[in-house]
Amino acid sequence: MGAHQQSERRVLSTRRVVFLVIAAAAPMAAIAGNAPLALVRGNGISLPAAYVVAAAVLLCFAVGYSAMSKRVVNDGAFYVFVARGLGKQAGVATAYVAALGYLSLAVGMGAAFGYFTSLVFSESGLDVSWGVFTAVGVVVVTLFGHRSADVSARFLGVLMALEFAVLLVLDVLVVGHKGTGAFPVQSFSAGELFGGSLGIALMFAFTSFVGFESAALYGEETKDPARSIPRALYISVTSIAVFYVLTAWVVIGGAGGTAAPERARRDLGDLVFTLAQQYGGTVLYDASAVLPCTSVLASWIALHNAASRYLFALGWEQVAPRTLGRYHPVHQSPYIGSAVVTAVTVGVVGTMGLAGANPYETIAASVVGMGTLSIVLVQALTALAVAVFFRGRADRSPFTGVVAPVVGVLGLGTAFVLASTNYATLTGTDNPLINVVPVLIVVTGGAGVVAARRLRSRRPLAYTQLAGTTNRHRPDDRAPHERPAYTRRYCVVGAGPSGMIMARNLLREGVPFDWYERNPDFGGIWDPDHEGSPMYESCHFISSKYTSGFYGAPMPQDFPDYPRWRQIRDYIRDFGHEYDLYRHVRFGTQVTSAEPIDGDRWRVTLSDGSVHEYDGLICCPGVTWHPNEITLPGQEVFRGAVRHSITFRDGLEFRGKRVLVVGAGNSGVDIACDAARHATTAYLSVRRGYRFVPKHVAGLPTDALLAGKLDPPKGVVLTSDVNAMLDGLVGDLTRLGLPAPDHDALSSHPIMNTQVLHHLGHGDLLARPDIARLTETGVVFADGSEAEVDEIILATGYEYRMPFLNPELLQWRYGHPQLYLNVFSRELDSLYVLGFVEFADAAYKRFDEMAQLVMIDINARETGVRKDELTELKRTDTPDLRGGVKYLDSPRHVNYVERSTYMAYLAELRDRFGWHDVDDHTYDAQRADAPSIATSKEPTHA
């Protein structure tokens, strides 16, 4: 669910999550309904001790969950942790079972509410059918489900306070009458604890806590889920446990201590109410008789919310109809899921009610028992996932990483077994049709596995991102003296953005290095005066200022959404001043050759003729310096000009010419737009259908919206189906003469341009298919059409080259070096390449995360710690970095990686080797006394 995070949805405080959770547990209903049954069928007056045991197990579970939360970011529900610990298929199965559980409980509460409310009215002399009250409850619950959880939480807080107040009044009155006799010490004696059926008592105790786990469902709606959700779990379990233990103990004392089981056998569900009348008179009796209705209503609302959010999660994760994954554009609630829960409730309760089924003994008993069993299973699986997650981790503590998770697994597993084997006791009926209902749990879990496998087969990227988690940020808390005293010296080649990122990391770690750049200043390709730069006047960044920029150096707020090339050039140079990088680079010096020598070292020759030796070579060459120049059929007879786009500078060059642009990459469509504005006639030749991505959606940068950096305006709802979204925004491209897209939106590099569609739609630019051949004065296209042209621009991309390095030192495929994780040479242990990678994302922060791999290896080389393990990974590890996506079969996409899959794997390696993560504060200590990047307007350059 995390991909669409919206700050407007984060409205719940810890206190309000606690209200929702305790309301779901329905403490009034649990004491009134479960306690008498436990007294009769369990271990008698030791019920408070059973509550203590259950609370202790659940607190251990909460400790393990909290410990995992400190390492794994999870805004969603428990199924996400199950997926992380036990695998994605187990996670989806858990989500399906949880959805079934909450849906069943919501349906059961609907029937129970009608039943109890009709009884209260019947006592008052008003005989109204239970179905009428259920129908009224449906309306109330639906209204709350349609609104945000915050509205429900405020209402439930009031009802919860009334529940606690009435029972606490009863407790006080019993203590006032009985004194210390209200707390029979025998309740905690070993003889009583093990004298009856402890297993059944524990079953009732554990099931009384069902609902506390729903805290995790509200992670997306809290401002700080890492803090709020574990706290809500602790507070909820502790509050419910204290309430249950104290109230059950006092009820036992008020009912006669050791004689309490016999009285419970006589009174059963009326036990609490007869005690209220005995000790508090008619007023307390009337209040306690009404409150089960409000308690069930509160539980119904909370469980309805929980079921809605699980259906929303299933829809968003694409393992259920995607429509379920939509939230309300105004209330930010999962309103489609809520409507489905309402429909199921009406359908099940209405159908069974019309068939004459008893609302309590048949409808509620059948579905509440199944719901309870489902949720206990979800809790047990989550506890197991936490235990598996911590297995073998070096950073686990003995208690939070071993003891607490194991106790949680054993305790909750026992609870599930007890509830399964004593299911007839749990439901209170011997009806075989009711007691066979739990088979649905197995069927539902199996359906979850099938849905996960189907998603993996049909939409592999969605499967890769399913139940996604990230490791919680690990800062570098080492003091400077705790870092190794590095003695090996490295050579860094290139001072574009990737080289600057690498140098900043080496400086921070204290690694000696020399740094060479052939051009006279920073700026890389963004300075058109640099030799070989492909820059042109109309060029802008294709990622927005919100997602772009270096760590610790956000792009200035006064930048436009998509900065112009001059702004990027100056921003890069300001970055060099901000982090004092100018003092460490040698401009105007080219590395002409680098060759490996014995001892994993390198001999480097410079353009001034000097030769130096280094312990490692770090190449940061950039990828758009060397044009991929093709020869067109018949080009030798063509009398016009044919040139690569690297030579293009300004659209004014096209005035008075008929121009053909070949290629529809981002540069190609930019230049085609220039041709549309300035040329006499402009053509765009494309070989296949492409997907064009608007730079703005609802007036906001597209990448920032999809990344969750900006919230969509109210009334705008984003979908998880990118193809559907683009098709809806862009429309039918064949109307403009373009081929229909022949691939998914995410299976090729994004074309961030819709101006080209504007020019096509206005006839300023004409779309044509692939070129068959050139003639003396024009072009014949593959469809047989012809055009007279004066100039052809080849926007045919660039080649990966490192001219200073013998290409035979590496393995190449379709012009791309085959590097481990696109960073490490598999053949030469001391050779690193930074920047030879392509993905659909802003690059600078990703380069920094890749640079951490280089730093891990440099550190391992220096210290020897786990160096053999890292070397073995370089040689043999072959992870799928594409997330199952089938990218276009083209040279550009040979080394293409799926961004989230790639970054997740890099994060795994950092976690595995105990290396820190990077953020905007990692490099604070390296800032120089220079003007701030955010305020510098006209920087001076070295």
Image (cartoon, grey):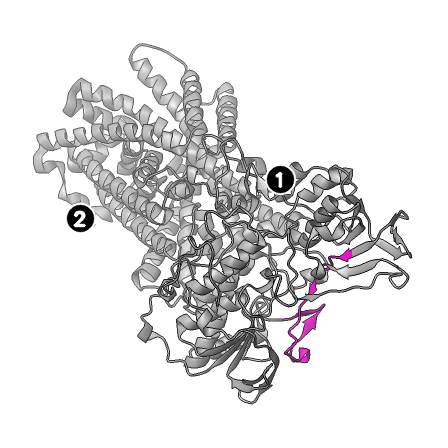
The residue stretch that appears in magenta? 793-818
Residue 186 seen in render: yes
Question: Within the image, what quadrant is residue 36 found in?
Answer: top left
The residue tagged 2 is 189
Using residue 631 as the reference point, say whether residue 470 is left or right of it.
left
Which residue is pictured at 38% across the width and 64% down the height? 927
At label 2, which amino acid type do we have?
Ser
Q: Residue at x 36, y 17 (%)?
A: 118
Q: Position of residue 537 (x, y in %)?
A: 64, 53
Q: Secondary structure at mark 2?
A: loop
Depth check, front residue: 250 or 346? 346
Say which amino acid is labelled 1: Met
- Inter-mark Cα distance, 1 to 2: 65 Å
Residue under the image location 82 percent in, 59 percent down: 641
Numbered circle sitting on residue 420: none
**Coordinates of residue 922 in the picture (x, y in percent):** 39, 62
User: Which residue corresponds to mark 1?
Assistant: 725
Relative image position of residue 625 (x, y in whole percent): 65, 66
Which residue is farthest bottom? 598
Residue 360 lies, in percent from the top left, at 40, 26
